[in-house]
Amino acid sequence: MGNQTYFDALETRTQEQREKEQFAKLAEQLAHAKANASFFGSLLKDIDPASITDRAALARIPVTRKSDLIDMQRDNPPFGGMLAAPLGRLFQSPGPIYDPEGHEEDYWSTARAFFAAGFRSGDVVLNTLSYHLTPGGFILDAGARALGCGVIPAGPGNTEQQLEVIRDLRPSGYSGTPSFLRILMEKADEKGIDTSCFKKALVTGEALPPSLRDWFTARGLVVGQAYATADVGSIAYETSAREGLLVDENSIVEIVRPGTDDPVAEGEVGEVVVTNLSSKTYPLIRFGTGDLSAVLAGESPCGRTNMRIKGWMGRADQRTKVKGMFVDPKQVDQVIKMFDEIQRGRLVVSSDDNRDAMTLQVEVDNGTDELAKAISEQVQNICKLRGAIEFVSLGSLANDGKVIDDIRTYE
């Protein structure tokens, strides 16, 4: 892989070829999950895996959300009936949510992200994500080693010791959060330790503001980003084009309306839903990450042809409590779907003199009192709470993925 431009030929397939090959692989993954994991056996009991041949068919499978895993795993330990092959390591994430690792090489599919960030076989990587109970350190470690890199399993913190390691081992690359990389480099400056050995970095877990990227660039450091989760591993990564994040070849990514199973139009902000094609151990099918993003139109100038997303744009879990009762995005979507006149809608939760209030803003072409009354009745019927109805002009609601906008302030 010394001088090649792309990790492999998969990255430059036509989109038609990619969809055909991925959905053939998906049929195998669905059959495996259905036969070997009780949760998927139940979820897919009325679905023939061979019938899921395109995205429209895939959208018929219900989304399983990360927020559901805590209860699922508690009721059916350790993994909610989703385990479909022998385990390697077992991890804990906040929640707590437990995450398995299988035995496949580069189980978390991060080698491709390292390659796109400029890493090659022979590089030595200082990996600073945690190796203690959480999968973060292992997610990056496995990808770097699969690429042929040496890895220093540094983990977070212990800055003084890490500076000694940098001074003595001269790693060419860094992986971890961007903020800790800056801390290391600034502390090294104070102590007169040379960090010019760092030429490349793959960062994750935090935003990378343009100003911080510029700070690294000024020091001769090329930084790429990876979007990964503890459940799936790598979902998307940055390329040299620096235009959005390219979806990993081992995943099918959809953007759906938060709280629903429904894909949104290209460019509309919604929840990132991932179907993993490579893990036989934990074959997540239509897994709702709880993260917001949107599809970025067109192909990357770098020559890779897969779909791009805009990056992390917030959290999709907008369930909120109003007057002591939970209101869920799925309920709001249910109301909106009952009326053909509504193009889009958003429930605004506010507080008037410390009293909760709800207003359903709906984009309609021609609102009437009769329509407002009918919508209001369905809000009360479905949400069990009264809510005002506000008609707004078509296209006026922000494209930010919000189905529920809680604007209450507590002082």
Image (cartoon, rainbow, N blue to C red):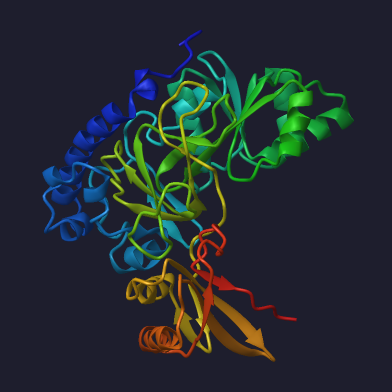
Instruction: Note whether residue 385 is visible.
Output: yes
Q: Quadrant of residue 87?
A: top left
Pick out the residue farthest to the top.
3
Tell me which residue sits at (39%, 89%) in the image. Answer: 377
Instruction: Note whether residue 135 is visible.
Output: no
Specify the quadrant that holds the N terminus: top left
Place of residue 193 in the rendered image (x, y in percent of width and height, measured from the top left): 82, 23
Toward the viewer: 221 or 323?
Answer: 323
Q: Quadrant of residue 200?
A: top right
Pick out the residue farthest to the front.
366
Place of residue 408 in the rendered image (x, y in percent of width and height, measured from the top left): 65, 78
Q: Quadrant of residue 353?
A: bottom right
Place of residue 21 in the rendered image (x, y in percent of width and height, measured from the top left): 24, 30
Q: Is residue 194 left or right of residue 320?
A: right
Q: Is residue 82 above or below residue 118?
A: below
Place of residue 374 in the rendered image (x, y in percent of width and height, measured from the top left): 38, 87
Toward the viewer: 9 or 152?
Answer: 9
Q: Is residue 372 above or below residue 391?
A: below
Toward the viewer: 102 or 33?
Answer: 33
